[in-house]
Image (cartoon, rainbow, N blue to C red):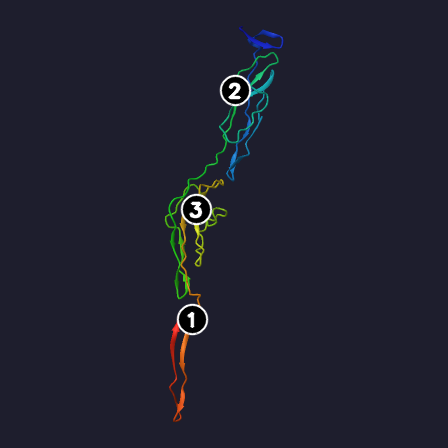
Amino acid sequence: MNDIDCTDSDGPHTVQMGMEIPAPTGTMAITNSTCTDCNLSGGTIAIGTVSGTGGTIEYSTDNGATWSSSLPVYDQDGPAQTILASVLSVSGCRSGSVQVGVTEPGECMTPAAPTGSLAITNSTCTDCSLSGGSIAIGTVSGMGGTLEYSTDNGAVWSSSLPLYDQNGPAQTILASVISANGCRSNSVQVGVTEPGECTSSTATPNVSLDIINSTCNSCMVGGGSITIAGAS
Protein backbone atom coordinates (compact mmCIF):
# COMPACT_ATOMS: atom_id res chain seq x y z
CA MET A 1 0.00 0.00 0.00
CA ASN A 2 1.44 3.39 -0.99
CA ASP A 3 1.55 6.36 1.36
CA ILE A 4 0.62 10.02 0.56
CA ASP A 5 2.20 13.17 1.96
CA CYS A 6 0.04 15.64 3.94
CA THR A 7 0.86 18.78 5.89
CA ASP A 8 -0.76 20.24 9.00
CA SER A 9 0.33 22.51 11.86
CA ASP A 10 2.75 19.85 13.08
CA GLY A 11 4.55 19.74 9.75
CA PRO A 12 4.67 17.18 6.94
CA HIS A 13 3.83 13.56 7.59
CA THR A 14 2.58 10.54 5.69
CA VAL A 15 -0.85 8.97 5.63
CA GLN A 16 -1.56 5.50 4.32
CA MET A 17 -3.67 5.35 1.13
CA GLY A 18 -6.24 3.38 3.05
CA MET A 19 -6.89 6.56 5.02
CA GLU A 20 -7.53 8.65 1.91
CA ILE A 21 -10.35 11.25 2.25
CA PRO A 22 -13.35 10.33 0.08
CA ALA A 23 -14.55 12.95 -2.40
CA PRO A 24 -17.85 14.67 -1.59
CA THR A 25 -21.09 13.68 -3.28
CA GLY A 26 -24.30 15.42 -4.33
CA THR A 27 -25.11 18.60 -6.21
CA MET A 28 -25.65 22.23 -5.29
CA ALA A 29 -29.07 23.91 -5.46
CA ILE A 30 -28.58 26.66 -8.03
CA THR A 31 -31.21 29.24 -9.01
CA ASN A 32 -30.06 31.12 -12.08
CA SER A 33 -30.51 34.87 -12.56
CA THR A 34 -33.16 36.22 -14.93
CA CYS A 35 -33.60 39.51 -16.77
CA THR A 36 -36.50 41.70 -15.59
CA ASP A 37 -36.86 45.34 -16.66
CA CYS A 38 -33.44 44.93 -18.28
CA ASN A 39 -31.83 44.07 -14.91
CA LEU A 40 -30.36 40.69 -13.98
CA SER A 41 -31.27 39.39 -10.52
CA GLY A 42 -32.39 36.34 -8.57
CA GLY A 43 -29.32 34.11 -8.90
CA THR A 44 -28.41 32.06 -5.80
CA ILE A 45 -26.21 29.14 -4.81
CA ALA A 46 -27.20 26.83 -1.93
CA ILE A 47 -25.52 23.67 -0.64
CA GLY A 48 -28.26 21.40 -1.95
CA THR A 49 -27.35 17.74 -1.44
CA VAL A 50 -23.57 18.20 -1.32
CA SER A 51 -22.02 16.30 1.60
CA GLY A 52 -18.66 14.86 2.59
CA THR A 53 -16.89 13.09 5.43
CA GLY A 54 -13.43 13.19 6.95
CA GLY A 55 -12.97 16.94 7.03
CA THR A 56 -14.32 20.28 5.79
CA ILE A 57 -16.04 20.66 2.44
CA GLU A 58 -14.41 23.37 0.33
CA TYR A 59 -15.38 24.87 -3.00
CA SER A 60 -13.49 26.25 -6.00
CA THR A 61 -14.65 28.25 -9.03
CA ASP A 62 -11.21 28.46 -10.68
CA ASN A 63 -10.62 24.78 -11.42
CA GLY A 64 -9.00 24.11 -8.06
CA ALA A 65 -6.45 26.95 -7.99
CA THR A 66 -8.04 28.32 -4.81
CA TRP A 67 -10.43 26.75 -2.29
CA SER A 68 -12.83 28.14 0.30
CA SER A 69 -15.18 26.62 2.85
CA SER A 70 -17.69 29.38 2.04
CA LEU A 71 -20.25 28.82 -0.68
CA PRO A 72 -19.38 30.69 -3.89
CA VAL A 73 -21.15 34.00 -4.49
CA TYR A 74 -23.41 33.83 -7.54
CA ASP A 75 -22.24 36.10 -10.37
CA GLN A 76 -25.49 37.68 -11.64
CA ASP A 77 -23.95 38.96 -14.87
CA GLY A 78 -21.79 35.93 -15.59
CA PRO A 79 -19.65 34.40 -16.83
CA ALA A 80 -20.91 30.94 -15.95
CA GLN A 81 -19.25 29.35 -12.90
CA THR A 82 -18.19 25.70 -12.79
CA ILE A 83 -18.11 24.77 -9.11
CA LEU A 84 -15.87 22.02 -7.75
CA ALA A 85 -15.98 20.57 -4.24
CA SER A 86 -13.48 18.59 -2.20
CA VAL A 87 -12.92 17.66 1.44
CA LEU A 88 -9.91 18.95 3.39
CA SER A 89 -8.97 16.95 6.48
CA VAL A 90 -7.58 18.44 9.68
CA SER A 91 -4.21 16.93 8.74
CA GLY A 92 -4.17 18.87 5.45
CA CYS A 93 -5.06 16.00 3.15
CA ARG A 94 -7.43 16.95 0.35
CA SER A 95 -9.80 14.54 -1.33
CA GLY A 96 -10.30 14.35 -5.03
CA SER A 97 -12.49 17.13 -6.45
CA VAL A 98 -15.86 16.68 -8.11
CA GLN A 99 -18.09 19.06 -10.07
CA VAL A 100 -21.15 19.88 -7.98
CA GLY A 101 -22.75 22.63 -10.06
CA VAL A 102 -22.63 24.99 -13.04
CA THR A 103 -24.34 28.39 -13.12
CA GLU A 104 -26.13 29.67 -16.21
CA PRO A 105 -26.73 33.40 -15.64
CA GLY A 106 -29.53 35.04 -17.62
CA GLU A 107 -28.91 37.62 -20.32
CA CYS A 108 -30.41 41.05 -20.96
CA MET A 109 -30.38 41.31 -24.75
CA THR A 110 -30.92 44.84 -26.12
CA PRO A 111 -32.66 44.88 -29.53
CA ALA A 112 -31.28 46.70 -32.53
CA ALA A 113 -32.73 50.14 -33.28
CA PRO A 114 -35.63 50.22 -35.79
CA THR A 115 -35.20 51.36 -39.37
CA GLY A 116 -37.32 53.14 -41.98
CA SER A 117 -39.55 56.21 -41.88
CA LEU A 118 -43.21 57.01 -41.25
CA ALA A 119 -45.62 57.93 -44.06
CA ILE A 120 -46.75 61.43 -43.09
CA THR A 121 -49.38 63.48 -44.93
CA ASN A 122 -49.38 67.04 -43.68
CA SER A 123 -52.52 69.11 -43.08
CA THR A 124 -53.57 71.87 -45.47
CA CYS A 125 -55.76 74.96 -45.16
CA THR A 126 -59.11 74.84 -46.98
CA ASP A 127 -61.81 77.45 -46.38
CA CYS A 128 -59.64 78.72 -43.56
CA SER A 129 -59.76 75.28 -41.82
CA LEU A 130 -56.80 72.90 -41.39
CA SER A 131 -57.43 69.23 -42.17
CA GLY A 132 -56.06 66.14 -43.92
CA GLY A 133 -53.01 65.45 -41.75
CA SER A 134 -52.21 61.79 -41.03
CA ILE A 135 -49.43 59.50 -39.78
CA ALA A 136 -49.00 55.91 -41.06
CA ILE A 137 -46.30 53.34 -40.28
CA GLY A 138 -44.71 53.60 -43.72
CA THR A 139 -41.47 51.58 -43.85
CA VAL A 140 -40.69 51.61 -40.12
CA SER A 141 -39.78 48.14 -38.81
CA GLY A 142 -37.90 46.59 -35.91
CA MET A 143 -36.98 43.17 -34.51
CA GLY A 144 -36.58 41.64 -31.08
CA GLY A 145 -39.55 43.25 -29.37
CA THR A 146 -42.33 45.82 -29.74
CA LEU A 147 -42.05 49.03 -31.77
CA GLU A 148 -42.82 52.11 -29.72
CA TYR A 149 -43.04 55.82 -30.56
CA SER A 150 -42.38 59.07 -28.71
CA THR A 151 -43.19 62.69 -29.53
CA ASP A 152 -41.55 64.17 -26.40
CA ASN A 153 -37.93 63.19 -27.01
CA GLY A 154 -38.27 59.81 -25.30
CA ALA A 155 -39.91 60.84 -22.02
CA VAL A 156 -43.02 58.75 -22.80
CA TRP A 157 -43.31 55.81 -25.20
CA SER A 158 -46.36 54.13 -26.76
CA SER A 159 -46.88 51.22 -29.15
CA SER A 160 -49.66 53.24 -30.84
CA LEU A 161 -48.83 55.56 -33.72
CA PRO A 162 -48.94 59.23 -32.68
CA LEU A 163 -52.03 61.24 -33.55
CA TYR A 164 -51.40 63.97 -36.10
CA ASP A 165 -51.84 67.46 -34.64
CA GLN A 166 -53.69 69.26 -37.45
CA ASN A 167 -53.00 72.71 -36.01
CA GLY A 168 -49.43 72.05 -34.90
CA PRO A 169 -46.98 72.50 -33.43
CA ALA A 170 -44.71 70.29 -35.53
CA GLN A 171 -44.04 66.82 -34.08
CA THR A 172 -40.62 65.14 -34.12
CA ILE A 173 -41.33 61.40 -33.86
CA LEU A 174 -38.81 58.90 -32.43
CA ALA A 175 -39.06 55.11 -32.59
CA SER A 176 -37.39 52.35 -30.57
CA VAL A 177 -37.86 48.64 -29.85
CA ILE A 178 -38.50 47.33 -26.33
CA SER A 179 -37.91 43.62 -25.68
CA ALA A 180 -40.01 41.31 -23.52
CA ASN A 181 -37.38 41.57 -20.76
CA GLY A 182 -37.62 45.38 -20.71
CA CYS A 183 -34.47 46.26 -22.65
CA ARG A 184 -34.97 49.26 -24.98
CA SER A 185 -33.01 49.81 -28.18
CA ASN A 186 -31.49 53.12 -29.16
CA SER A 187 -34.06 55.55 -30.51
CA VAL A 188 -34.08 56.93 -34.05
CA GLN A 189 -36.01 59.78 -35.67
CA VAL A 190 -38.59 58.35 -38.09
CA GLY A 191 -40.56 61.44 -39.05
CA VAL A 192 -41.35 65.14 -38.57
CA THR A 193 -44.77 66.68 -39.19
CA GLU A 194 -45.19 70.06 -40.90
CA PRO A 195 -48.80 71.14 -40.31
CA GLY A 196 -50.28 73.69 -42.72
CA GLU A 197 -51.23 77.22 -41.72
CA CYS A 198 -54.35 79.31 -42.20
CA THR A 199 -52.97 82.85 -42.28
CA SER A 200 -55.40 85.76 -42.11
CA SER A 201 -54.57 89.46 -42.15
CA THR A 202 -54.76 91.14 -38.77
CA ALA A 203 -54.35 94.69 -40.09
CA THR A 204 -57.40 97.01 -40.08
CA PRO A 205 -58.01 98.47 -43.56
CA ASN A 206 -57.71 102.26 -43.93
CA VAL A 207 -60.43 103.38 -46.36
CA SER A 208 -61.96 106.79 -47.09
CA LEU A 209 -65.12 106.95 -49.13
CA ASP A 210 -66.46 109.82 -51.23
CA ILE A 211 -70.24 109.84 -50.65
CA ILE A 212 -72.77 111.96 -52.52
CA ASN A 213 -76.19 111.69 -50.96
CA SER A 214 -79.35 111.40 -53.03
CA THR A 215 -81.77 114.29 -53.40
CA CYS A 216 -85.44 114.59 -54.24
CA ASN A 217 -86.12 116.19 -57.61
CA SER A 218 -89.70 116.31 -59.05
CA CYS A 219 -90.63 113.89 -56.29
CA MET A 220 -87.94 111.47 -57.47
CA VAL A 221 -84.96 110.44 -55.32
CA GLY A 222 -81.71 110.17 -57.17
CA GLY A 223 -78.11 111.34 -57.53
CA GLY A 224 -76.66 109.38 -54.58
CA SER A 225 -73.26 107.66 -55.07
CA ILE A 226 -70.37 106.07 -53.18
CA THR A 227 -66.80 106.08 -54.52
CA ILE A 228 -63.46 105.18 -52.92
CA ALA A 229 -61.46 108.27 -52.31
CA GLY A 230 -58.45 106.36 -50.93
CA ALA A 231 -57.65 102.95 -49.37
CA SER A 232 -54.67 101.09 -47.92
Report the residue at 41% width, 77% height from top. 209
Numbered mark located on residue 98 in the image: 2
Q: Residues within 10 Å of mark 3 (few under 14, many from 20)?
A: many
Numbered mark located on residue 206 in the image: 1
Q: Amino acid at mark 3?
A: Ala
**Corner quadrant of residue 55:** top right
Q: Quadrant of the C terminus?
A: bottom left
Q: Amino acid at mark 2?
A: Val
Q: Helix, strand or loop at disc 1?
A: loop
Query: Does 222 sit left or right of 27 as displayed?
Result: left
**Corner quadrant of residue 185:** top left
Q: Residues within 10 Å of mark 1 (few under 14, many from 20)?
A: few
Q: Amino acid at mark 1?
A: Asn
Q: Helix, strand or loop at disc 3?
A: strand
Q: Helix, strand or loop at disc 2?
A: strand
- Which residue bears the numbered disc 3? 175
